[in-house]
Image: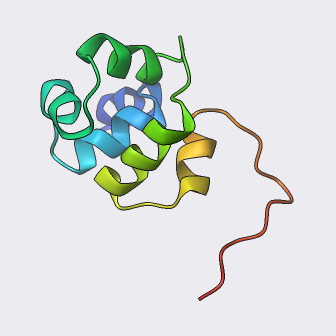
Amino acid sequence: MIEANQDQQEKSLLRQLREQNQLTQFQLRLLIGVSERRVSDWENGNAKPSLENAVALARAYKVSLKVICQACGIDVAGVPDDEG
């Protein structure tokens, strides 16, 4: 049980979101039109998605852009939440 929790903690939030949506990197690349390498770079923190790709990720994972920004390590403190 502890090992499973440690494995989850080592995974990036972007990877966790992808896995929660039961997508492989290959499936995600087809869905949003980028290379598997690009997805891997985002998940490993080697690159950040463009705004257009961040929107595509938010749609694919059914989360807000704010969540995607946080998953990419972008400080969103003080950014208001969307209303209605």
* 67 in relation to 34, above or below: below
Q: Look at the image and name its color scheme.
A: rainbow
Is residue 35 visible to us here? Answer: yes
Residue drawn at point x = 15 percent, y = 32 percent: 30
Does residue 36 appear left or right of residue 14 in this picture?
Answer: left
Query: Which percent across, then down, holds residue 5?
Result: 37, 37
User: Quadrant where the N terminus lies?
Assistant: top left
User: Quadrant where the C terminus lies?
Assistant: bottom right
Residue drawn at point x = 35 percent, y = 56 percent: 59
Query: Which percent across, then down, holds residue 51?
Result: 56, 39
- The quadrant where residue 74 appears: top right
**Nearer to the camera, 7 or 54:** 54
Does residue 74 appear left or right of residue 24 in this picture?
Answer: right
* 11 in relation to 58, above or below: above
Query: Which percent across, then down, holds residue 38?
Result: 36, 16
Is residue 24 visible to us here? Answer: no
**Nearer to the camera, 13 or 78:** 78
- The quadrant where residue 45 appears: top right
Q: Residue furthest right?
A: 78
Residue drawn at point x = 14 percent, y = 25 percent: 26
* 81 in relation to 59, above or below: below
Residue drawn at point x = 51 percent, y = 29 percent: 49
How many numbered circles are shown? 0
